[in-house]
Amino acid sequence: MLRTTRTVFPFSYNCSRPLTRKLYSTTTTRPLKVSVLGAAGGIGQPLSLLLKLNPYISKLSLFDIHGAAGVAADLSHIDTSSDVQGYATENGGLERSVQDANVVIISAGVPRKPNMTRDDLFAINASIIHKLGRACAVVAPNAIYLVITNPVNSMVPVLKNALAAGGVRDSRKLIGVTTLDSVRASKFLSQVKGASPETIRVPIVGGHSGATIVPLLSQSGVQLSEKERDEIVHRIQFGGDEVVKAKAGAGSATLSMAYAGARMTNAVLRGLSGEVGVTECAYVESPLYTDQGVDFFSSRVTLGKEGAEDIHPVGLINDYETGLLETCLQNLKKSIKKGLSFVP
Ligand SMILES: NC(=O)c1ccc[n+]([C@@H]2O[C@H](COP(=O)([O-])OP(=O)(O)OC[C@H]3O[C@@H](n4cnc5c(N)ncnc54)[C@H](O)[C@@H]3O)[C@@H](O)[C@H]2O)c1
Ligand SMILES: O=C(O)C[C@H](O)C(=O)O
């Protein structure tokens, strides 16, 4: 088997070895296919660029209802090993783009504009996710699915039902991407403390929307005053709104999301390739709070050959975080119910 060693990817992240940032170096032994659905969009394009640099990927497959062929042609000139193909809807393009994929990343859908909540995107994005899920179940039943499309809290349950309708039911392979909250937490905390962001890791549990985003600052090892804590928590929970406001109608976070999505994908690929102990926070079908009617929850998960193989409990939290968690669970329960109840 071909073995190549590359040092091109800009980060290596592992919660169990959280304090290192280095140029990515790996020995690839298994050719992996990654498909991006929504690849010509604001997130899809920079995410695909970062994936083109990822040495784990041998085939990068791009699908969009508009413009994926052009993005693929452009990326295909980059002198990294992976092959890039673009697909449109015609001639079974969606099915061909995900056929035999190891990982399918979904950023297809509509982003927020100012004064909208993520939940305002539910109807249109649920239809898109459901349709994509039904098609993917047939041709990529063994893929790991990474859901970026908002509202993530509801879209993951929507995709669960769409995949299940096609007979695909492995909950370890359905993952909502909340990595941007972790990225923001490291950056915002580093700014307050004058520290390097690479040295700060904050577990983020719950979901990906406002009060469902629960940063466990007490586990970061950083000491904060109550005022600092309240300001940081608010900024992490509503970081997305900062970008939506600044873009003034032109969409929401795309570049930081592409970075976060590439980091999460890289973690999934490391797990798929047999690396042990790869951990990220992610929104998955989770046993942690089912007793409270919450069947999906983000916490640290260990990624392996089958996807999210181990789901870690939130660990020791303080009274303040317990309050945040209670509010989170109340909100999350409604979003999950809405997603599971979606009828196309
Ligand atoms: N999880 C997160 O942390 C996070 C962060 C930022 C944005 N988002 C969400 O990601 C989604 C995409 O955001 P964006 O800024 O890239 O939007 P965008 O409008 O720039 O791109 C979306 C792309 O999806 C495509 N698309 C629409 N319907 C499709 C379908 N049926 N099949 C394939 N492609 C289809 C569009 O043609 C477009 O190219 C939004 O829902 C946004 O809210 C999530
Ligand atoms: O805020 C949004 O709508 C996009 C994304 O969820 C984010 O957190 O930036």
Image (cartoon, rainbow, N blue to C red):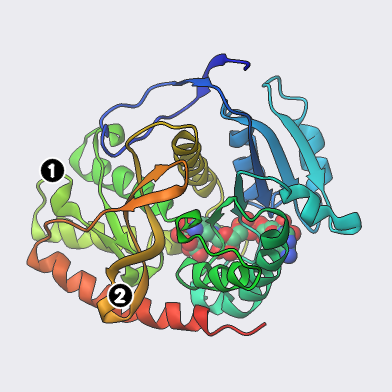
Residue 194's quadrant in the figure? top left
Marks 2 and 1 sit apart, C-alpha to C-alpha, by: 29 Å
> Mark 2 CB in 8 Å range of ligand 1?
no
Question: Quarter of the image containing the N terminus?
Answer: top right
Mark sitting on residue 207: none
Q: What element carries label 2?
A: helix
Q: Looking at the rendering, in which quadrant would you find the C terminus?
A: bottom right
Residue at left offset 52%, top offset 75%: 116
| Residue 243 appears anywhere in the view | no
Q: Which residue is drawn at 57% across and 77% down?
A: 122
Give the residue number, with chain letter if any, for mark 2. 290
Of residues 45 and 60, which is closer to you in this image?
60
Q: What element carries label 1?
A: loop
Few, some or many C-alpha atoms within 10 Å of disc 1 (few <14, some 14-19, many ≥20)? few
Taking depth in this image into account, of 121 and 138 the one nearest to the observer is 138
The amino acid beneath tag 1 is: Gly
Q: Which residue is drawn at 30% across and 44% down?
A: 186
* Residue 53 image position (x, y, % from top left): 60, 28
> x%, y% of residue 283?
40, 60
| Left or right: 173 in relation to 311 | right
Task: Give the x, y percent position of residue 206.
Answer: 32, 65
- Circle nearer the viewer, 2 or 1: 2
Q: Earlier in the sequence, mark 2 or mark 1?
A: 1
Q: How many marks?
A: 2
Left/right placement of residue 177 relative to residue 142 reads: left
Can you identify the residue that label 1 sits on? 221
Name the image quarter holding residue 278: top left
- Residue appearing at x 33%, y 51% in the figure: 310
Using the image, determine if residue 305 lies above or below residue 22: below
